[in-house]
Image (cartoon, rainbow, N blue to C red):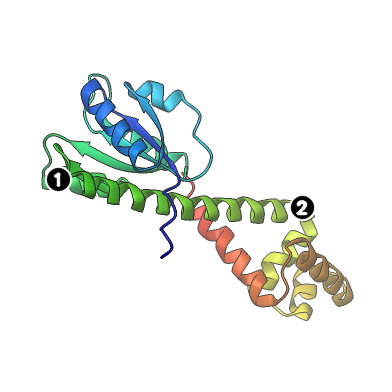
Amino acid sequence: MASNPPPTGNVLVVEDDPLVRRALARLFRTAGYAVETFERIDAFLAAPQPPGPACVVLDLHFPVGNGFDVLDRLAAARTPLSAVVLTAHGDVPTTVRAMKSGAVELLEKPMDNDRLLAAVEEGLERSARQSEELARQRLLEERRGSLSRRQREVFELVVAGLANKEIAARLEIAEKTVKVHRAEVMRRMEAGSLAELVRAATELEAGAATEP
């Protein structure tokens, strides 16, 4: 019988209690994750984010700052880093706020280890998906950035559903010139069909809508 592959990913523990911090680090290392620990929020925020999927396990309350500050910073930065929040005093408003701020889950201390590991695994899966989406978004933005001003105009009118003749009239250029620009747009955007070009435009629009 084939064994399951070992877990992969980075777990960042942000916890001011040294006993809890060490216990969490030991738990995640035993589970097979790469672990980095931080005592303070500012130290965590100043550290470079590790490559690959990553999940931060974050205490909600600190002598300076709180976990919601971190969640807000992560959301504003459009980082693929996911977060599992820990608290000694959980209630419905706190849980709702944590979920709205993008946390995978909010767990009350003392945590059940199996539930915590399951939440981190979900967070790493979410981080991997977001990393792929952000990479795709950056690639599309680079491709669009390679278009000339006129090609950009043709691109926008093509995905808006205008025919070559209508685009020519709108831009006051020859229809054959539109065809040349359209072919170059398809090449630079690496779209094999109109459907792919429209999909790329939709993804770009969705990415712009999520920017802070």
Give how far across and how far down residue 167 sits, in percent: 75, 73
Q: Secondary structure at mark 2?
A: loop
Give how far across and how far down residue 95 sits, in percent: 18, 46
The residue that mark 1 highlights is 93
Amino acid type, mark 1:
Pro
Q: Residue at x 85, y 70 (%)?
A: 173
Where, quadrant-wise, is the N terminus in this rendering? bottom left
Determine which of the numbered discs, if any, sits on residue 135 in the image.
none
Which of pointers 2 and 1 lies earlier in the amino acid sequence? 1
At label 2, counting other C-alpha atoms closer than 10 Å, the crowd grade (few under 14, some 14-19, many 20 or more) is some
Q: Residue at x 40, y 26 (%)?
A: 44
Dividing the picture into quarters, in which one does residue 71 lie? top left
At label 1, counting other C-alpha atoms closer than 10 Å, the crowd grade (few under 14, some 14-19, many 20 or more) is few
Amino acid type, mark 2:
Ser
Give how far across and how far down residue 3 sits, in percent: 41, 59
The residue that mark 2 highlights is 146
Question: Residue 116: in sight, yes or no?
Answer: yes
Which one is in front, 8 or 123? Answer: 8
Question: Residue 71: in sight, yes or no?
Answer: no
Dividing the picture into quarters, in which one does residue 203 lie? bottom right
Q: Residue at x 34, y 53 (%)?
A: 122
